[in-house]
Amino acid sequence: MAISARFPQFISARTKKTNLYYVAATTVLCSVFYLIGIFQHGGFSGRQISAAAILPSVPCEPVNKDSIDTTNLTSSSSTVSLDFAAHHAAEDLVAVAAPPPAKEFPPCKAELSEYTPCEDTERSLKFDRRMLKYRERHCPAKEELLKCRIPAPFGYKIPVRWPESRDSVWYANVPHKHLTVEKAGQNWVRFKGERFTFPGGGTMFPRGADAYIDDIGRLINLKDGSIRTAIDTGCGVASWGAYLLSRDILPLSFAPKDTHEAQVQFALERGIPATIGILASKRLPYPSRAFDMAHCSRCLIPWGQFDGLYLIEVDRVLRPGGYWVLSGPPINWEIHWKGWNRTAEDLKAEQDQIESVARSMCWKKLKQKGDLSIWQKPTNHLHCKANRKVFKKPLFCQDQDPDSAWYTKMESCLSPLPEVSNIKEIAGGALANWPERLTAVPPRISSGSVDGITAEDFSRDTELWKKRVAHYKGVDFQLVEKGRYRNILDMNAKLGGFAAALVDDPVWVMNVVPVEAKVNTLGVVYERGLIGTYHNWCEAMSTYPRTYDFIHADGIFTLYKDRCEIEDIFLEMDRILRPQGSMVIRDDVDIMVSVKSIADGLQWDNRMADHEDSPHVREKILIATKQYWTADQNQEGSNASS
């Protein structure tokens, strides 16, 4: 035991002695070699040894190789003078072309400050007026595309922040007083000082939109989260949608660009989701089963005409069990017919026509109270298919994609709901109530209806965009500032993860699913309780200039590579972005070289950043801000003032 206890101490002492031997031996050897070196270079005479004595002397002047005397290269001649003159000039180098300057885009003429390319009044007059086809989208040909930047009107101000903007906006930003005169008695909009104010009135809600929505809420449940998305057809200045927002219901309002000048523009300036659109001959650019509620308040759409074509389109975009709310002519015609300047017989015939079309689509009329009437779409089509023996029209559409809605012609046939096994089952799957709906796996995904996307993919995508949005807020601090941004556009929304990550911020997001995308995911976006539209980014969007405060573009330029000019997409982004608005563009590094050049040409303040995961990832991020500038006060030409 004693030997065992001393053994580690013995080993340690022996190891220390061995290390000392190695150190001593190394020191001796180094000293010996040092002394040998001194002896070889002149011994210990004390004289200094010049570098020339050790190193060979090489002349610096240029010489011919053939004339070199190799026998003298090691000589230490002191007569050789060093030549430090330059023997090459910049002119002798191969010329390298300088990178081309960024292409500059001049300002457009001042009168184009409200230019909407695909709803241009002059162009529209060339098209068929039947069914108001001339008010649909008619985009310019490639050779007609403008290559200039749309100016803001002179005096344009940074928009009023939400929620104040709901009730008040700057006159300079939407300089149109027409509605203040035409709708003076209906409390749509008023003008005072430098601002327009919105009392919340409407043609059919003289007590205000809030009280009107309360009336609807007494007939159907607006509080339990079952109604989240709503479409307002013929929206006026969108006061109905404005007051729905405070109830956690997300509206999307549309109206044509018509005699009610700037109604959609007012809505957007107020910070309310809206777009230019019309029920004419083409489907609305939304998927089937998108909205929980549709609304028309004296929207003047001929619901009963053309074999009920427009009600059939509302049926397509309503989810199973969704509601259609109608107020205004012909509802309650018995009271109002004299004030509407129509005969009682005419109004009764119109209501009978609407009731007939609704029954033929298997809608149930829930209530009619005062000026309101509400119908409900069936939750499935089991009974509806059986009663086609009674209702010969409309028939069910055959071999038609109900989600196809980009320049798709409307047909007077019903879009069939997904099959069910019993009468109580909800076609396509039941949706969770809001807010659980946002993160619950959408029925389109859980049922396998979306190619290549699983529930696990959906969950990963949701977490990915939480991470990415947090990163965006780190590089663009204005995203963190509440109220700085209100109207946001996602140009390639995919599953809506970007919008979902912003749900707690006071913003709304227009989620665009490009028609060129490999997978149509817009139905998934709506099943999450979000809103969006189909679009082809080779064309202009159906909206006014200066619609959005912030634009997000994920992979959009890779998607449209070789489809159309990147600069045309950029010019459209510049048109719809507000002065001092920002954008985040993420794409492959090769594409981003061109992207940055065009951003420079548009005079955007911009900077490139690495991917949030690593600088080695090929995908890069461009953060850009549009400068503030307006049209010149005194010139109608192409000049603009910065």
Image (spheres, rainbow, N blue to C red):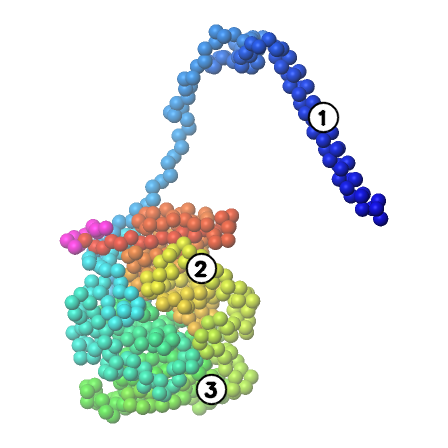
**167 displayed left or right of 314:** left
112 over 162 or under it: above or below: above
| Residue 470 - label | 2
Q: Nearer the viewer, mark 1 or mark 3?
A: 1
Q: Amino acid at mark 2?
A: Ala
- Taking the magenta stretch, the answer to whether it contains residue 637 is yes
Q: Amino acid at mark 1?
A: Ala
Residue at the (43%, 87%) spot, across then down: 362
Residue 595 position within the rendered picture, expressed as x and y whole percent measured from the top left: 39, 50
Residue 422 position within the rendered picture, expressed as x and y whole percent measured from the top left: 54, 86
Q: Amino acid at mark 3?
A: Cys
What is the quadrant of residue 555 in the picture? bottom left
65 over 491 or under it: above or below: above
| First to last magenta residue range | 633-642
Q: Nearer the viewer, residue 46 or 547?
A: 46
Q: Nearer the viewer, mark 2 or mark 3?
A: 2
Q: Nearer the viewer, residue 448 or 160?
A: 160
**446 displayed left or right of 365:** right
Crowdedness near tag 1: few (<14), some (14–19) or many (≥20) residues, C-alpha within 10 Å = few
Q: Which residue is mark 1?
A: 25
174 over 58 or under it: above or below: below
Distance of label 1 from label 2 (alpha carbons): 62 Å
565 over 501 or under it: above or below: above
Residue 51 position within the rendered picture, expressed as x and y whole percent measured from the top left: 53, 14
**271 displayed left or right of 458:** left
Residue at the (38%, 70%) spot, across then down: 285
